[in-house]
Image: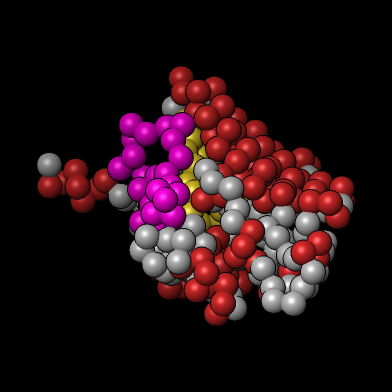
Amino acid sequence: MHEQVETLFDLTGRVAVITGGSGLLGYKHAEVIAAAGGIPVLVDLAGTEPGVKADRLAARYGVKALGCVTDITSPAQVKTLLETVLEHFGAVDILINNAANNPKVEADAGSAWSRLEHFSLEAWEADLAVGLTGAFLCSQAIGSEMARRGRGVILNVASDLAVIGPDQRLYRQEGVPADRQPVKPVSYSVVKTALVGLTRYLATYWADSGVRVNAISPGGVHNGQPEEFVTRLSALIPLSRMAHEDEYQGAILFLCSDASSYMTGANLVIDGGRSSW
């Protein structure tokens, strides 16, 4: 039993493709993969330096790592991504669908653009393209390769807003007319909820092929948001605070490793208890 515990979370040599890998949480996901001996492949847009960040991980953890500039909304680029990963490492074992459009709280202040009545079709389609279509395309290509090999793990990064509605009072600004108050865009909730649906579909679709598919629904991460926003949100959370940026790493490792070998089609909610109220 002791030997089993030692290897339960071991990812030595396993190749993990992480979309949005240069971002705040994407890089944290890559860190824990590397710390467990895995090979992180950071996938992100040009200008986010996935290659530089992959090199940083390789140097820090003594593992192989790769950065790939990829637009995951493009089937052709996703196909090239898979080919590149297979060329470098011969296999892909883990896919973390993490990429999403998520506007900053500060950017919404005093603006009506995010309100449902004014939310543009262009913004809607852009958000769904990255957060949902991108996850579909990556799952389709990389998941099919996993199924062909008979093993693999897909992890979709959803949100607490996949299980509860956004509390728009969090974004309210003093002195701003009601019809111009900023809100969390409708597309974010729709994308994150849909990812949970995609999780269940893929989990049952590839159950006989050795591919496990789960989702994680994290709460908000403290990352320089306005103090008033942090105070309001913390009041809605039983643990009375937002998450630290590294507090999801344990869950990522659990869901990507053999520690969760009998788990598929699930959505692991880690929100400080917010959805319990």
Relative to 110, is 243 on the left or the right? Answer: left
Q: Is residue 133 among what the camera can see? A: yes
Q: Which residues are magenta?
A: 248-277
The residue nearer to you, when weighing 268 against 242, is 242
- Seen as rendered, the residue at the extreme top is 208
Residue 154 screen position, x and y as percent: 51, 40
Q: Quadrant of residue 45?
A: bottom right
Relative to 103, is 246 on the left or the right? Answer: left
The residue nearer to you, when weighing 201 against 153, is 201
Residue 67 magenta-drawn?
no
Identify whether 61 is placed above or below 249. below
- Seen as rendered, the residue at the extreme left is 1
Name the residue: 40% across, 63% down: 247
Q: Is residue 72 among what the camera can see? A: no
Identify whether 232 is placed above or below 119. below
Residue 111 screen position, x and y as percent: 80, 69
Residue 169 screen position, x and y as percent: 62, 62
Name the residue: 66% across, 44% down: 191
Where, quadrant-wise, is the N terminus in this rendering?
top left
Residue 270 magenta-drawn?
yes
Residue 33 screen position, x and y as percent: 43, 57
Name the residue: 77% across, 40% down: 75
Relative to 29, is 109 on the left or the right? Answer: right
Number of marks:
0
Q: How is the image coloured?
A: secondary structure
The residue nearer to you, when weighing 274 against 58, is 274
Name the residue: 79% across, 69% down: 177
Q: Quadrant of residue 106?
A: bottom right
